Amino acid sequence: MKHLFSFLALSLFLVSVNSQTIVQTPKHGMSTAGGLRMDALALNDTATILSFHATAKPGVWISIPGKTYILPLGSTDTLYIKATENIPLGRKYYMTESGFIDFKAIFPALPKGTSYFDYGESNAGGSWFIYDIPTKNHPSKCPESFAGNWYNAQNGNWSLGLMQDVAVYKNMVWQYEEVSFKRQKGKIRLKRKDQDLELLLKKDKNENLLLTESNKETTLLVRSAKQIVSDKKSYTEPIFKMDTSIYSGYIEGYSSRAGFKTLSVSVNDILTGEQNSFVASIDEDGQFTFKLPFYYPHVVFVRSKIYNGSVFLEPGESLFQYLSTQTKGNNSLFMGSTAGINSDLLELRAISGPDYNEMSDTVMQINQQAFKSYLLEKLRTDLIQLEEINNKGTLGAKAYQVKKMDLTYRYFSLMFEYEWLYESAYRKKNNIPRTQ
C-alpha cells in the first residue's frame, strides 16, 4: 500500500510538471504571413509551442529563420526560437506535391501573466509577422449562434457583421456597448464616436435573422448570399458623371507595430493617360477612408504592406471593404452601393485573363499572325468559362458586362504588342539587359 501511495504521488507530480495550456486556433490580430495558419498554441513552464499549417505551390521554398522570435506585448524581452518539428530550422524547405506542411515552432516559456504576444522574424528580409496572439481565447461579446456575417435576403449584399469585438453595419465599424440575448432573440446597443443605435435581433423558424433598427422596418437577413443576384441591370449610357466616390474599410486586427500607417489608391485617368495616387491614414483601430474625384465607373488599385488588390468604384457611390488577414485567398467582404459588383468580380478572379509566362514562351515560336490567332483562342476559352458562370444565374449583370469587356480589351491590346513582347521574351531568355 505504501508503494501504491508513492506511485500515485509521483504520477500526480509528473502530471503537474508536464501539464500545459492548449489554445486551439487562437484568434490573433493582423498577420503578414501569407499562407501560414496558426492551428494551436501550447503553453507550459518550459516552452511555448506554436503549431502551424503552411501552404505554398509545390517546389516553392519556405524557411523558419534562426532569428524567429516571440515578444510579450509591452515587453522588450525577445524570446528567440529554440527548435522546430517537421521542418528544418534556418534552412530552406521545398514544398512537396501536397502543397502543405504541418510543423511546430518551439520557443522559451512566456513570462507569467502574459496575455498577448507577437511572432516575427528579426533577420534581414524577414516578412512573417503575427500580432496580438492571445494566451487564451476570449469569448465573443455576441452569442455564437448570432455571430458572423449576415446578408440581405433581397439583394444578397453583406448587411451585418457581428465580429468578436466589433460589429460592422451601414459601412461603419461599431463598438459593442450592451449585448442582451435570451434564447432566439435579443438586442445589441452599438456605439461609434458620437453615434449610437440599437439593433433588435430575432431568429425565425429557418434560422434566418430578423433585424430591426430603432423601431424601423424589419429586414430579413440570411447566412449566405451565393444564390442571390446582386443586380440585374447592366451599365447604360451615359456613364460619365463628375462626383466623389467614397472608398472606406476596416483591417481586422490592425496593429501600428506592423510599421505602416497608410494605404494608397492608384487611379488611371483615361483622358490624361496618367495614373493619380491618393493616400489615406489608417486609424489605430484599423479604419480608413478615401474620398476620390471620379467621373466614370472603373477599377482602382489598392496598395499597402498588408493588402494589394483592386476594387471597382463609381462616381457618387460608396464602397466599404472588410479586410481579414486571418485567412488566405478570398479575405474580403463588401458593403455599400457598389458591394454587389465587387463581390461578383472577386468571385470571377479565377478567370485571370492572359497568362504572361505562357505567352512569353509562345511569342518567340510563332509569327505575328499566328500570335493573333493564339490570343483569339485564349479569349474564346475565357469567354466560354465566363458564360458558364453567368448561365448559373447567380452573377450580377454589371459584373458580367465589366468582366467580358475587360477580357476582350486585354487580349486585343496584346495583339498590338507582338514586337515588344517578342523582344522582352528574347532578352529574358538570353539574359540581355535593357542597356544592351
Image (cartoon, rainbow, N blue to C red):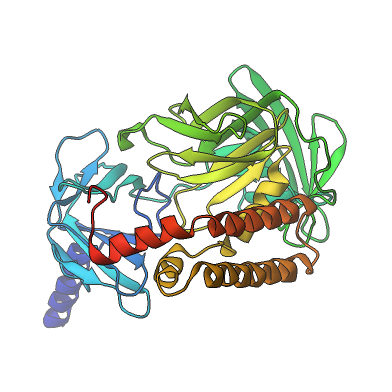
Give the answer, above or below, for where 119 lies relative to 282.
below
343 lies left or right of 140: right
305 lies left or right of 337: left
Q: Quadrant of the N terminus?
A: bottom left
Q: Position of residue 316 (x, y in %)?
A: 73, 27
Q: Residue furthest top?
A: 194
Residue 351 visible here: yes
Residue closest to the eye, 276 or 209: 276
Residue at 88% in and 36% down: 217
Q: Position of residue 188 (x, y in %)?
A: 68, 36
Q: Position of residue 279 (x, y in %)?
A: 46, 26
- Identify the image quadrant of residue 257: top left
Residue at 75% in and 59% down: 395
Q: Position of residue 142 (x, y in %)?
A: 60, 44
Residue at 61% in and 47% down: 333
Q: How many marks?
A: 0
Residue 158 visible here: no
- Identify the image quadrant of residue 346: bottom right
342 lies left or right of 78: right
201 lies left or right of 369: right
Residue closest to the eye, 7 or 218: 218
Residue closest to the eye, 408 or 149: 408
Residue closest to the eye, 179 or 252: 252
